[in-house]
Image: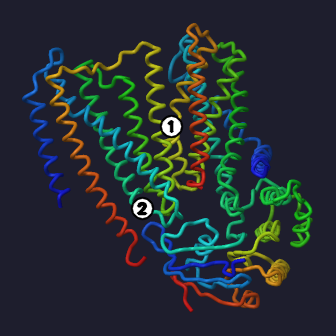
Amino acid sequence: MNQVAIEMSDVGKRFGTHWVLRRVDLSVRRGEAIALFGGNGAGKSTLLKLIASLLSPSCGSLKTSGNMRFFAHEKQLYSLLTVFENLRLVAQLTTKRVQVPFGCVDEALDRLQIRKIRDQRIGQLSEGQKKRVTLAKLLIGADDSEIFLMDEPYPTLDEEGKKVLDGLLREWREKGKTLLIASHERERTLPHVDRVLSIEGGRILS
Amino acid sequence: MILFFLGIVSVCFLGFAHYWGLFIAPPDRMMGDVYRILFVHVPAAWMALLFCFLNFLGSILYLLQKTQVWQRRRVWDRFAHASAEIAVVMTGLAVALGSIWGRPTWGVWWTWDPRLTTTALLFILYMGTLILRRLLEDPERRAKVVASLGVLLFINVPIVYLSVKWWRSLHQMQSSPETMAPSMVIALRMNAVALLGVCLFLLWVRLRLAKKEERLEEGGES
Amino acid sequence: MKAVRQIAALVHKDLLAEFREGHALFSVFLFALLLLLLFHFALSLEPALLRRISPGLFWLALFFSSTLALQHSFGREVEDGQWEGLLLLKIDPKVLYCGKLLSHLIFITILQALLVLPMILLFDLSPNRSLAVVFFLGGLGIATVGTFYASLTATLREGPLLLPLLLFPMMIPILLATVQATELALWGDLMGQKEAWLKLLVVFDTVFLLGSLLLAEQIS
C-alpha cells in the first residue's frame, strides 16, 4: 500500500493570465491530517480541486492514491429533490454492490440529525440545514474512501452541527483517513490536524 | 530563416500567378473576363478544406497524447488554433468571392450551391470554435474542449456536404458548372500552389506568434 | 452492470425534478406552438403552401425548443455545482453523458408527441405510424449532439448565446434527413428514398453517439 497519499511537485494553476497557484510542493502521508489556512482568494479551493482532479495543473506533477471525497463550498444539491432523494442518489451512484444499501442513507440522516427534514425539498431548507445534508452526502460510501478534502466545512453550521462535524473528523482520524481541511476557523480546526499549511497569493508558506 | 525566405518567395509567386491569371490566361468563351476571379476563389476553397483538415489533425494529435492533460505538449493545440484561423479566413474569402462571381454570372448574389453553402457553414462553425477559445479561461480545459470540437466538426463536414448535395439533386437544382479549358488550368494550378505557399507561411508565422502569446499568458513565473 | 444502474439513477433524478417542476415541459411545448404560429405569420397566408412546408416547420420548431430544454436541464446542474458534485464522485463522464442524453431523449419524445395534434390541426395533416421511426431517429440525433454541446457551454457565461451557434450547424444533416423523411412518410415515397434518408440518420446518430462518448471525458 502506498504510504504517500498526495504528492505535488512544483504545481501551478493559472486561469488566463492570472496564476492562482504557483510552486506548490506538497507531500501528504497516508493518515495525515492537514489544515489549510489562508485568506479569501488565496488559492485554497483551487488547490483542493486540483487534488480532486476537478482541475488540471498548468505545470508540475501531481499524484494521488486512494479514493477521495470532496466537501465543496457549493452545496451541490438538487433543489427540487428532497433530502432523502439527494442522499439516495449518492448511494445509487457510489455503491459497489448490486443492491443499493439504503441503510447507509438512514445512518447518515441520523448522524447529522436531519431525519426530521428527510422529506423536505432542498429548496426549502436553510443554509445550515443544506450544509448538514452536504455533510451527510459525504458519509455515504465514506468507508471506501481514504482521502477527505474539506473546503470550509464549518461556516453556516450551527453549534450543534459543528459538534457533529468535530465528531466526524475525530472518527475519520481514528480510522486512519487522510484529511485536508481548508478553513478560516483556526481554533476549531487545529485540534484535528497534525500539520498546518498557510497559503497566500497562491504560494504555500511555512 | 529559410522559412521566412520561402514565405517571401511564395508571396512573390502569388503575385506572379495573379498577374498570369489576370493578363496572360485567355478570356473564357462564355464568361469573358469575369471568370478570372475563380483563380482566387477556387484555390481559396481548396485551402479552406485543407486547413480544416489540418485543424482536425492537430486536434486529434493533441487528444491522442497519452499523458496527463497538463503534460501534453501544447504544440498541437497551437497548430490546431492557427489552422482554424487560416481556415476561417479562407472560407470567408471563398464565400465572398463565390458570391462576387455569382452576381455577374447568374445575376444573383447568392446561389444555394451545396459547395458554397457548406463552405459558409464551415466559416460559421470554425468561427464558433475561435469564439469559444476566448471564452474558456482554464487553459488546460480549453485545449481539451476545442480539440474535441475540432474532431467532431470535421467528421461532420463530409456528412453535411453529401446530405446537402443529395438533397439538392433530388430537387433538381442547378449546380455550379466549373469546367475549365486546359489553357486556364495552368493558371489555376499556379495560383493554387502559390496560395498554398502563402498559407503555409502564414501558418508558420501564426505558430510562432502563438508560442509567444502563450509565454506571455503564462506570465513571469511558472 | 454498474454503469447501467448509475445511468438509471441519473435519469430518474432528472425525471423526478422535471415532474416536480412540470411547467418546464409545458413552457417548452408552448414555445414550440408559438414558433409554429410565428412561422405562419412570417411566411405565408396560403394553407396549401404552409401544409407543403409544415414538416420543415415542425422540425425547426423542435430544434429551437430543444435548445431551450437543454439549457434548462443543464442550468439545473450548474446552479449549485451539482455537476461538479457528480464528477467528484468519480463517475465516468460517459455515464454522465448517457444519463443526460436519455433524459433529454425522453423529453424530446414527449415534446414530439405533444406537437403531433397541433400539427394535424394547424396544417391538415394525416400522420401514419411510419413517422415514429423518423421521430425517434431525429430525436436521438438532436439529443446526442445537443447534450454534448450543452454540457460544454453550460458553465460559460455566454453559454446560452454560444449553444445555438455551435449546435445548429452540426445538426443540419438531421434537419435535412428528418424533413425529407417526414415529407415522404406523409405524402408518399414513389422512388423509395425514405429509407436512404433514414439510413443517413442512423449513420449520423451512430457516428455522433460514439464520438460524444469517446470525447465525453475531454469536455467534463
* Element on which disc 2 rests: loop
Q: Which residue is mark 2?
A: B74
| Residue C128: percent from left, percent from top | 71, 15
Determine which of the numbered discs, if any, sits on residue C170 in the image: 1
Residue visible at 50% across and 63% down? B138
Residue for point 47% across, 51% down:
B147
| Horizontal side, residue C152 vs residue B102: left or right | right
Give x and y (percent) for residue B206.
Answer: 29, 56
Chain to which mark 1 belongs: C
Helix, strand or loop at label 1? It is helix
Residue furthest top in the image: C190
Whether residue B161 is situated above or below residue C45 in the rendered picture: below
| Image vertical order of residue B40 relative to residue A63, above or below | above
Count of number-bearing discs: 2
Front-most of residues B49 and C178: B49
Would you identify the image quadrant in which residue A182 lies?
bottom right
